[in-house]
C-alpha cells in the first residue's frame, strides 16, 4: 500500500524566510522517512528562482487524494487560506501567527488591511482542519481563544546548525577592525519589531555607557519605506553615530554580523517564535530582550529578559554584563543550555505524535 503524499502550503516562498525554510526542512524530514512531500504556493508569491521547485497552488486541488495530508502554514492573509478548506484530503494547520494590524495602520495602511484580512481568515478556519498545531504556546493560545480545538505545539523546526557556516571576510572586517562594541538585531524592518525603541536603547548606551559602539540592524525594509524613513529620522534626531542598516545580506554576511556582535538586543513587541534569538545564542552572543509575545517562551529562561524596563536601564544592563566577566559567563552558560535542549529535540518523534501520517 502506497503512503500518502504530504502537501505543505505556504503564503509565500523564498530562501531565507523562516516559514519557507521550515517547510523545506519538514519536506526533507518527511522524505528521509519515506514520505513524498511537496510544497505549494501561489505563483505570484513564489520567488522566481524557486518556481521550478514549488508546486502551483492553483493545481493543488486536482492533485490531492483523500488519504493525503495537507499542512497549511498559517501566517498572513492570502489565497492559500481560501483554497485549504476546500481540499479533498486530511488537513492540518500549523499556525505561525499573524501580526496585529495596529503596528502598521499609520505607516503602511495596505499592509494593515492584509493583516486584518489574515486575522479574519484565521478565525474562519476554526474547524477547517482535523489537526491544529502552533509553533509556540503563545500562538496556540490565540487559536484556542478563537475556538480551535485540541491545539498542540510543534516548536519551529530549524536545521539546528546555528553558529556555523562561512563568514564573509569583508563584512567581518567592516564590523570588527575599529574595535567598537557592536549591538546587533536581526529581523525584517517592520514596525512590530520596534526598532524605534532599539534606537533609544542604543542612544542611551552610546551616550552613557560606551561611546565607541555601533548598532547593526540586519534585515530587509522592502515594502516598509515609510517606517525606514522614520527610523533614519530618529538616527539623525538622536545624533547617533555608527548605525548600520544592512538591508538584504547573504548568509555569510549575516554570519559575520553574529560573529562580531557584542550583544543581541531585541525590543520586538510581537513575535510568534523569533528564531534569531536562538541564532544569537549559537554564536555565543549575550541576548537581551523585552518580554513580549512568544519571546519568553523561546528564551526559556536564557538571556536577559526585561519586563517594562526603560531604555536607560536596558542600556546600563547591557554594559554591566559586558564589563563583568563572571556575569557574562553565567548568561552565556544558560544560553548554551537552552540551545542544547532545543538541538536535542527528536523532531521526527514530535511529528509522529502530532500528525496522522
Image (cartoon, helix red, strand yellow):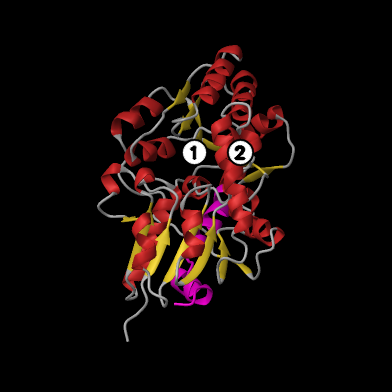
- Please determine whether, in this image, residue 94 is positioned above or below residue 172: below
- Viewer-proximal residue among 76 and 253: 76
- Please determine whether, in this image, residue 322 is positioned above or below residue 333: above
Q: Is residue 120 magenta?
A: no
Give the residue at x 47% y 70%: 346
Task: Look at the image and tell me whether residue 107 can be seen.
Answer: yes
Q: Which mark is residue 109?
A: none
- Viewer-proximal residue among 11 and 231: 11
Q: Dominant secondary structure of the magenta stretch?
A: helix
In the picture of the structure, the residue carrying the numbered disc 2 is: 268
Marks counted in the figure total 2
Q: Is residue 350 magenta?
A: yes
Mark 1, Cα crowd under 10 Å, few <14 / some 14-19 / many 20+, is some
Give the residue at x 63% y 34%: 103
Secondary structure under tag 1 reads loop
Secondary structure under tag 2 reads loop
In the picture of the structure, the residue carrying the numbered disc 1 is: 187
Give the residue at x 56% y 15%: 233
Mark 2, Cα crowd under 10 Å, few <14 / some 14-19 / many 20+, is many
Quadrant position of the C terminus in the picture: bottom left
- Please determine whether, in this image, residue 308 is positioned above or below residue 205: below
How far apart are the two marked residues, 2 and 1, measured between alpha carbons?
10 Å
Residue at the limit of the structure toward the right, as seen here: 308
Q: Is residue 259 left or right of residue 81?
A: left
- Viewer-proximal residue among 346 and 165: 346
Asked if marks 2 and 1 touch (Cβ < 8 Å), the reply is yes
Image spot of residue 254 (x, y percent): 39, 38
The image quarter containing residue 257 is top left
- Viewer-proximal residue among 331 and 293: 293
Q: Which residues are magenta?
A: 332-357
Image spot of residue 191 (x, y percent): 58, 32
Residue at the limit of the structure toward the bottom, as seen here: 1
Amino acid at each position: 500500500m502506497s503512503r500518502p503524499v504530504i502537501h505543505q502550503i505556504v503564503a509565500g516562498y523564498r530562501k531565507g524566510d523562516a516559514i519557507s525554510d521550515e517547510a523545506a526542512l519538514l519536506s526533507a524530514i518527511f522524505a528521509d522517512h519515506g514520505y513524498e512531500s511537496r510544497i505549494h504556493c501561489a505563483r505570484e508569491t513564489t520567488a522566481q528562482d524557486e518556481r521550478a521547485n514549488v508546486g502551483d497552488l492553483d493545481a493543488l486541488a486536482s492533485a490531492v487524494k483523500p488519504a493525503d495530508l495537507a499542512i497549511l502554514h498559517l501566517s498572513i492573509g492570502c489565497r492559500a487560506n481560501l483554497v485549504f478548506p476546500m481540499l479533498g484530503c486530511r488537513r492540518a494547520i500549523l499556525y505561525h501567527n499573524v501580526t496585529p494590524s495596529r503596528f502598521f495602520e499609520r505607516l503602511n495602511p495596505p499592509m494593515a488591511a492584509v493583516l486584518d484580512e489574515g486575522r479574519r481568515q484565521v478565525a474562519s478556519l476554526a474547524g477547517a482542519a482535523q489537526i491544529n498545531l502552533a509553533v509556540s504556546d503563545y500562538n496556540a493560545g490565540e487559536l484556542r481563544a478563537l475556538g480551535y480545538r485540541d491545539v498542540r505545539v510543534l516548536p519551529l523546526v530549524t536545521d539546528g546548525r546555528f553558529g556555523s557556516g562561512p563568514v564573509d571576510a569583508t563584512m567581518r572586517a567592516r564590523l570588527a577592525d575599529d574595535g567598537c562594541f557592536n549591538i546587533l538585531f536581526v529581523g525584517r524592518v517592520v514596525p512590530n519589531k520596534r526598532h524605534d525603541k532599539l534606537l533609544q536603547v542604543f542612544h542611551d548606551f552610546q551616550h552613557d555607557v560606551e561611546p565607541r559602539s555601533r548598532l547593526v540592524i540586519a534585515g530587509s525594509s522592502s515594502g516598509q519605506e515609510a517606517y525606514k524613513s522614520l527610523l533614519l529620522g530618529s538616527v539623525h534626531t538622536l545624533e547617533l553615530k555608527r548605525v548600520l542598516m544592512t538591508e538584504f545580506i547573504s548568509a555569510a554576511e549575516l554570519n559575520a554580523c553574529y560573529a562580531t556582535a557584542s550583544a543581541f538586543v531585541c525590543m520586538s513587541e510581537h513575535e510568534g517564535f523569533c528564531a534569531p534569538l536562538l541564532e544569537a545564542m549559537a554564536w555565543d552572543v549575550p541576548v537581551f530582550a523585552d518580554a513580549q509575545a512568544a519571546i519568553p517562551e523561546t528564551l526559556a529562561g536564557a538571556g536577559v529578559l526585561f519586563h517594562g524596563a526603560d531604555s536607560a536601564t536596558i542600556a546600563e544592563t547591557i554594559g554591566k554584563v559586558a564589563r563583568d566577566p563572571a556575569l557574562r559567563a553565567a548568561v552565556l552558560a544558560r544560553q548554551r543550555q537552552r540551545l542544547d535542549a532545543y538541538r536535542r529535540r527528536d523532531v521526527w518523534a514530535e511529528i509522529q505524535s502530532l500528525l496522522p501520517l
